[in-house]
Image (cartoon, rainbow, N blue to C red):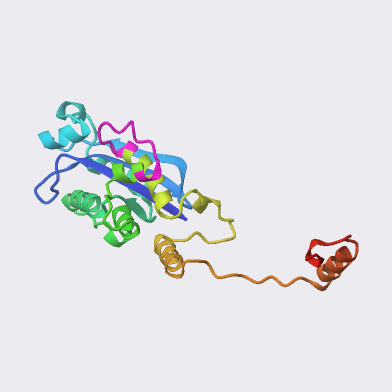
């Protein structure tokens, strides 16, 4: 199962008010585990970066001035993400910015339903607990000490680790190839069922006639068995 973890940095918080994408990054997952394939580009937003946004990510107008514009990297981006589900932390924000960029060049929008929102997953699994990326890194013991500023590439690398924990931890990547990988909805449904019952159903394995005969022979050879005492 191929998925793409995606994140953006922007000039501000409002795509509807004209803020633009200045960095976009993706990492590829197979069966929830990173493959090592990445895509990352800085972009010239053709407008100033707000002071509040600069304080968060540190990407200046001067740094971005010679970077490509969104239409120039779109073909590469589309080839990388293909038709895979997109794992995004607060998906409405990033999808909204990408679709605003696509609208400017009269291209069809991304379908929001293809996004797997890790904020929603975290809130379902841990009701009432903080669901920020930093809070989830702390919960799962993921080292985010390098995150002194927000950056799309670092954030998708951290989010890939967080996502793996949200859908079942390191065991999620150990399934046999013959077994289909569980989607997020299936993982959450199974997790909820296990919590509701308190235990997994027991399984019965009947011994074969050969095993029963071997057991009987073993008992005959035992001297002074403990279960005959008392």
Quick check: 104 left or right of 80?
Answer: left
Q: For the C terminus, which image quadrant? A: bottom right
> Which residue is drawn at the image coordinates 55% and 70% (left, top)?
201
Q: Tell me which segment is drawn in magenta.
A: 139-154
Above or below 28: residue 219 = below
What residue lies at 41% left-to-right and 44% top-to-bottom?
A: 161
Res. 48 visible in picture: no
- Determine whether, in the image, residue 158 is placed left or right of residue 151: right
At 29% from the left edge and 50% from the top edge, which residue is drawn? 89
| Residue situated in front as seen by the camera: 193 or 147 | 193
Identified at 90% across, 62% down, the residue is: 221
Spot occupied by residue 71 in the image (x, y as percentages of width and height): 24, 43
As rendered, which of 166 and 195 lies closer to the eye? 195
Place of residue 228 in the rendered image (x, y in percent of width and height, measured from the top left): 81, 67
Extreme residue toward the right, this view = 221
Q: Give the vertical position of 176 relative to 157 (above or below).
A: below
Q: Can residue 67 be seen in this view?
A: yes
The answer to whether residue 146 is magenta is yes
* Residue at the extreme front of the image, as rendered: 230
Q: In the displayed structure, does residue 141 sit left or right of residue 222?
A: left
| Closer-to-camera residue (190/228) | 228
Q: Is residue 39 magenta?
A: no
Residue 108, how many percent across, how many down? 24, 57
Name the chief secondary structure element in magenta.
Answer: loop
Given residues 14 and 184, the one toward you in this image is: 184
């Amino acid at each position: 199962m191929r998925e793409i973890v995606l994140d953006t940095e922007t000039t501000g918080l409002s795509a509807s008010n004209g803020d633009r994408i200045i960095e976009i990054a993706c990492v590829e997952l197979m069966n929830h585990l990173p493959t090592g394939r990445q895509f990352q580009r800085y972009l010239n937003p053709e407008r100033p970066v707000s002071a509040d946004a600069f304080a968060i990510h540190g990407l200046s107008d001067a740094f971005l001035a010679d970077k490509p514009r969104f239409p120039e990297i779109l073909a590469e981006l589309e080839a990388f993400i293909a038709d895979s589900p997109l794992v995004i932390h607060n998906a409405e924000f990033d999808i909204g910015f990408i679709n605003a960029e696509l609208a400017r060049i009269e291209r069809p929008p991304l379908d929001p339903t293809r996004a797997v929102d890790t904020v929603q997953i975290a809130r379902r699994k841990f009701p009432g607990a903080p669901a920020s990326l930093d809070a989830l890194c702390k919960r799962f013991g993921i080292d985010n000490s390098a995150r002194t500023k927000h950056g799309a590439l670092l954030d998708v690398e951290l989010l890939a680790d967080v996502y793996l924990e949200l859908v079942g931890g390191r065991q999620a990547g150990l399934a046999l190839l013959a077994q289909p990988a569980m989607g997020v909805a299936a993982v959450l449904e199974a997790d909820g069922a296990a919590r509701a019952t308190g235990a997994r159903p027991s399984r019965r394995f009947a011994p074969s006639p050969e095993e029963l005969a071997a057991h009987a022979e073993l008992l005959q050879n035992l001297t002074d068995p403990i279960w005959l005492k008392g």
